[in-house]
Image (cartoon, grey):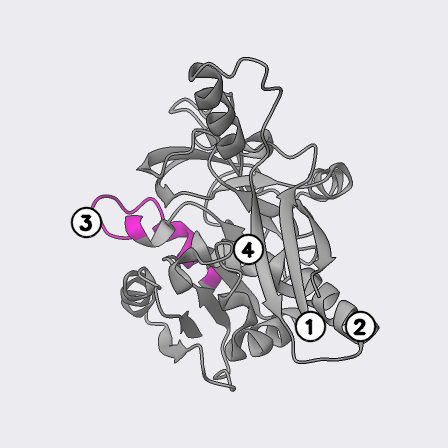
Amino acid sequence: MKSSVVVFPGSNCDRDIAVTLEKLQFKNTMVWHKETKLPKSDLIVIPGGFSYGDYLRSGAIAAKSNILNEVIKAGNDGSLIIGICNGFQILIECGLLQGALLRNFGLKFISKDIFIKIQSNKNKFFNKYKKDEVVKLNIAHNEGNFFTDKKHLKELEDNNLIPIKYCDEKGNITNASNPNGSLNNIAGIFNKNKNILGMMPHPERMSDKICSDDSGLPLFLSLMN
Amino acid sequence: MKFSVTVTLKKDVLDPQGKVVSQTLKNMGMTNLIQIRQGKFFEIDLDEKNPSKAQDQVKEMCEKLLSNQIIEDFKIKQKE
């Protein structure tokens, strides 16, 4: 499979995800944001970090970069796109995903391991996980508090467009297990066609037991399935 | 032509920063404070003489970049 990782000034998870993809034999290309052409890719990754120092709103400036025009076209044509953390913020700012990521409820930058529960595995991104599986991943963000209007929330719920929610170690989805105040504990969402995923947790940080854990690896294996 | 733009969070969107600022002021003794909503302020200087064209352009700036209309409202004020 071919993949492209888009790099902005301030991206800092681009190398991690490239290492993960290359380990799984993806033919990966790093694509600088000033490029106007995207290599033909089965998967496009918008990585985490602090593009443009989070100026204006997280992801707002990156969303207007040259390469994003190509990413938007590819996304509308059905390419698989994953935006992680700042990548999720960028996908929202460029309009490929709806909603908003507000400042964390507690006003603090949160960097810690959390648990998510797989809500739906009948899609390209989570098919190697079991439904209701509890997965440990890492989060590191200041603006991860997902918010949207009632109409969009209903659309997300009615169409299985919320694949992951924050939960505790046992899988209970509660206020106490919600790290950032996200609406209904939402940790990630799909677009209508489920070819575009935005998520706050970092699966690439848990793709090797040597680093911490490999609980994020099935996501990438799902994409290859 | 000069404009100022204020961007604030919509009424029903939680503004944790505004809340903290408000609480701090209350702690400082300003007990009659009802609430504070924090926002962003932009000063825009535009090389355009036609007022309605300039207005439209500032509106476009607000809609396309300066605000996220899902969570924010904007107000445009012409200065001169």
Q: Amino acid at mark 4?
A: Leu
Disc nearer the start of the sequence (4/3): 4
Is A214 in the magenta? yes
In the figure, is residue B74 to the left or right of A110? right
Q: Position of residue B53 (x, y in %)?
A: 80, 75
Looking at the picture, which amino acid does disc 3 mark? Cys
Residue count near mark 1 (Cα–Cα under 10 Å), binned few <14, some 14–19, many ≥20: some
Q: Is residue A111 rendered to the left or right of residue A41? A: left
Q: What's the distance in space between the residues labelled 1 and 4, CA to CA?
A: 42 Å
Q: Which residue is mark 3?
A: A211
Q: Which chain is disc 1 placed on?
A: B
Instruction: Please indicate whether residue A12 sits to the left or right of residue A74 in the image.
Output: left
- Say if mark 2 contacts mark 1, CB within 8 Å: yes
Q: Is label 1 in contact with label 3 (beta carbons under 8 Å)?
A: no
Label 4 neighbour load within 10 Å: few <14, some 14-19, many 20+ = many
Q: Is residue A189 visible?
A: yes
Give the answer, above or below, for where A1 lies relative to A88.
Answer: below
**Of marks 2 and 1, which one's residue comes earlier in the chain?**
1
Magenta residues, start to end: A205-223
The one of A59 and A121 positioned closer to us in this rendering = A59
Give the residue number, with chain letter if any, for mark 1.
Answer: B1
**What residue is disc 4 on?**
A197
